[in-house]
Image: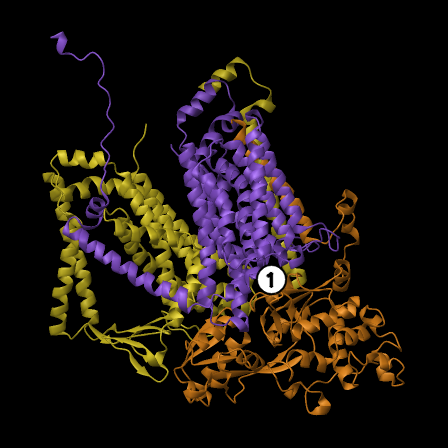
Amino acid sequence: MMRGPRLYIAGLVAAMVIGMIIAACAGAAPTPVGSEEVAAPAPQQETKSTLDIVRERDKLICVGNANLPGFGFLDEQGNFSGFDVDFCRAVAAAIFGDPDKVEIRPTTAKERFTVLQSGEGDVLFRNTTWTMSRDTDLGLNFGPTTFYDGQGIMVRKDSGIQTLEDLNGASICVQTGTTTELNLADQMAARGIPYEPVVFETADEVTTAYEEGRCDAWTTDKSGLVSRQTVLKNPADHVILDVTLSKEPLGPAVRHGDDQWFDLVNWVVYATFLAEEHGITSENVDTFMDSKDPNIRKLLGLEGEFCAKVGLENDCFYNVIKMVGNYEEIYNRNLGPDTIFNLPRGLNSLYTDGGLLYAPPIR
Amino acid sequence: MHESFVAAQARPPFWRDERVLRVLSQVLVLAVVFGLLYFFYSNMMRQLRETLGIPISFEFLRQTAGFDIGESLIEYSRADTYGRAFLVGLLNTLQVAVLGIVFATLLGIIIGVMRLSTNFLVGLVAAIYVEAFRNIPLLVLLIFWAQAVFLKLPRMKEAIIWPGPTYISNRGIATPWPVPAEGWPAYRLALVAGLILALVVAYLLREQGKRTGRMPLVTLWFLVTWIGAGVVGWFAVDLTVGTPLTLDRPVLEGFNTQGGRVFSQQFMALLSGLVIYTAAFIAEVVRAGIQSVSKGQREAAYSLGLTPFQTLRLVVFPQALRVIVPPLTSQYLNLTKNSSLAIAIGYPDLFAVAGNTILNQTGRAIEVFILVMAIYLFFSLTTSLFMNIYNRRIRLVER
Amino acid sequence: MASYVQTSQAETLAPPTERYTLLGWVYKHLLSPWYNLVLTLVGGLLLYAIFKPALTWAFTGARWAVIPANLNLLMRGQYPAEEAWRLWAVIFLLALAGGYNWGVWSKTVGPALITAFAIPWLLMLVPWFSWGTRLNLLIVEAVGLVGYALGRITPKQRSQWAVYAFLAYLLAMLLLLRGLQEGHPTLPMVPTRLWGGLLLSLLLAFFGIVFSFPLGVLLALGRTAERMPAIQTISVLYIEFIRGVPLISLLFMSQVMLQLFLPEDFPQIDHMLRALAAITLFSAAYTAENVRGGLQSIPKGQYEAAASVGLNGYQTMRLIILPQALRAVIPVLVGQFIGLFKDTSLVALVGLFDLLGIARVILANPDWLGTQREVYVFIAFLYWIFSYLMSYSSRRVEEALGVGKF
């Protein structure tokens, strides 16, 4: 019996050591732990490019959302899907030729930037508004806008609210840590309208509180309002006011300091625009392989070495289109008429259709 | 003397000399700890400088916050600074902590005493209460309370109205609240004067008690004097200067009630969750304290001719208190720290405002965490300091 | 005179026990003085007022369908379904190791043992479980019995085998849960980000306990080492700092800032481990304080006696003081570990999908809007049953072994 406690303690310590070892391996990709391996990296380690890190890891880590249906959402099978998720897959397809080599790192609104800054994620696709202070203060670079949005307000139809002024003294639900919260404060202060902000951590809590009547109104990006309206108990009882509180260009972001990586992300997004412009879809892309149009040939990697300029294989854009699709396909798959959201394209149409999507040429 | 005796006989080799080993091991531990700290610090500074390009600075506290806060004890608007937003959060934390401590203590004492009741049913209710709430996580309780109880109250338009009027809805509870009127400055003076008078009375009674050996109920007389002075002062001020306080009643106007005092749904959910959870622990503390005083003590006191009340006041209570106070204080501290879970239900406490909104707007993780942790630490350390002093005063003297 | 003096001691009588008839008991405990009657009425009304609506809701109003539909998510999060057999294997091994330990340490068949073996049968009654689950529970029962039988036939001199069995179990568990490497044919790696639900909550609590215990003991020794002021100061600073800040702030820090403290090329520490690090560091400070209580409860005489038989400081600690101190604080430590299990729910706030986190994900699913009560009541019940079982069994073990008595 005397040996009992001592053995137990010895056992615990041993277990801790073993656990730590296993744990350490769990974090890193299977790297061999040899003494020469440990010593070696120091001299050659100047600044490893993000692309090298991603390649070495053999997967892309994408800072995303798990709570916004249509953009980033964890479905019942436990998979991530959505508009933003598809762009993550597009980047993975461009790098690896395999859209599944991506890990979505779900984040709250608050932690998304730190996760990216700390190098834990490679790129951020998380319905994130491009603002000047984020672009400068936070050490981020914002890529091309993938979704032009604006902040709106949803109210109950029977409340009789039609303008912002009608919200005098109302309780307004808003998600904390978003530009939405600041815009609301700015707009109401500018008009001198008193109101009670009711802030919540996640979009779900905001919706619940609004639906239960805790708030008279609820504000977030219009796309978010539309997407969430569909899951309210009686969508028809609610109406989105015809006011736009702000401009909300949503797009990808990367860390400062790696321009090649920044270019790569930008051009993957542009490639989806260009593919739609040329009418190339994932279904018909192979029929374009004998196209004579130099623009298409450059996009598909048949002419010139454009992908190499961002450090990739020549078929990088081909893979994006083939495996994920062009912008229209991505949009329609997640937000279009066949989904419960049925969100009109509006500003998110090609410039040729009166929208704002305009990609520079590949030359 | 023991050591010098050994030393005189034969010095052990230095690697077995305990004094040398002691110094060596300390040096080693210090080296490892400081080495690690330096390692962390240098990494952090390098990353801040090179990768992110944002040096540590508390300048941001003077910048405009730009966001609104739902409830605040002081004047606050979006045009105020981050520093002031911090203060709003701090005051909200203090408010919920102080009220929580008061109510949790009351409820805890009631439940603790109920558990000792000879009445089976009463004991059962208390036992169910304690076992139910001690064994579920506070966070689950808080979220349940906020989302499944307070949010399911009637909406504003169908609010329950109690006389007063008090409006109870899923936005919170709006009740009448006293506000200072023209007589307030005069009445405040009267209250201070009453306090001084009561202190004098208490001092005189105590001196008299020491002289005669019969200690009167000092605290009781202190309270009687002060409250008496307060009541007399009220009428005096009311008749001469004007009423000290008027009642501000809430009125339903537009979407919300105006006037009175509104305890928001988040505040109520946080407060009641904290109170219910902590009371279960306090009940156990109280029960253990009362049970720790052995039956023999009571019997001895009775046999000396003390009345039941005297027995309670002079024998049972002081001894029970010795057992109760240390764990009670740590429960108070837990409640204060647990109030940081407000973040889950949207109450703007210190942690939610600073660790959430401010951190998010400014991205200054290190500075914000230093401030927040320093504030919580300050609460804890001051409390444990007083605790230690108190403990030293009341503990049994041994050997 | 001598004849009046009793020469032998009179037989000691046991104190009279209170015996009532049922009615007598009811009278004494519910009705007897008038105020008792009032209290009974008030208590009864209170119970009625609480349980009537609660039970009505539970049996008629509630949409319990949300639970079976999401049972897999609640139990194991995103852990892949095709790898679920590994979780069962972990449970089988636990039953084996647990049964073996029981057989080695306790040679009597008591109510506790019967209860333990009844648990799988009781679980089989849960209507939401599939037949496959029930079959697995049957295997658990069988394996547990085998382990118990093996334990019973293990000779007493070989008691330490029980500890080895436990250690082997720890290793096997980690191996099974995590797997070898990606794409391995039989044991593909399941990254920790897929661990979730009850599985994650239990693992966090379990490893939090295992890792924080040695650290806590070291800190307690450091804090009581009065002749080593530097070590004592460091221990005190650490303990007071950790105990002074809320766990949630440590969790946030570990998620947001841990990577900042490490070199840039340091591999990314995954999410769960960061949370685990925060939980371990937090728990260690509390363990230290509890163990310190045990250390202080050891009378000075023990140290003096140890010194007088020539033990040095290290030997005194290892052989005399620590075994007694740890034995004395077992009940407090169990209480703390229950607290730790409940505290793991905080990881939901930093984006992990533990039991509470996964509950929030389920509530975000459009199909299950408005089922907050059902989901939260269910997970609260799960937390409750585990905490209660832990505290109940520890009380039984205390009574049986007489530990915790100073």
Percent from the top left, x then y, of residue C274?
Answer: 59, 54
Q: In this orientation, which residue lies closer to the viewer: C389 or A148? A: C389
Tell me, what hue is chain A?
A: orange
Residue furthest top as drawn = C2
User: Which residue is located at x 52 percent, y 37 percent?
Assistant: C218
Residue B115 seen in the current view: yes
Q: Secondary structure at mark 1?
A: loop
Residue A208 placed where, x, y %?
Answer: 47, 73
C177 or C279, which is in the foreground? C177
Q: Image height check: is B79 above or below B119?
A: below
Residue in view at x 67 percent, y 71 percent: A85
According to the image, what is the colour scheme of the structure? by chain
Q: Residue C50 is drawn in which quadrant? A: bottom left
Within 10 Å of disc 1 (Cα), the crowding (few <14, some 14-19, many 20+) is: few
Please tell me the colour of chain B: yellow
Question: Does residue B30 show up?
Answer: no
Residue appearing at x 14%, y 64% in the figure = B231
Q: Chain of mark 1?
A: B
Does residue C222 appear left or right of residue A347 in this picture? left
Q: Position of residue B257 (x, y in %)?
A: 33, 79
Q: Is residue C241 above or below residue B74?
A: above
- Tell me the quadrant of the picture where the C terminus of chain C can be found: top left
Along the line of sight, the residue nearer the viewer: B121 or B27 = B121
The shade of chain C is purple
- Disc 1 marks which residue? B55
- Quadrant (top left, top right, bottom left, bottom right) of the N terminus of chain C: top left
State left or right for residue C239 relative to residue B124: right
Amino acid under disc 1: Pro
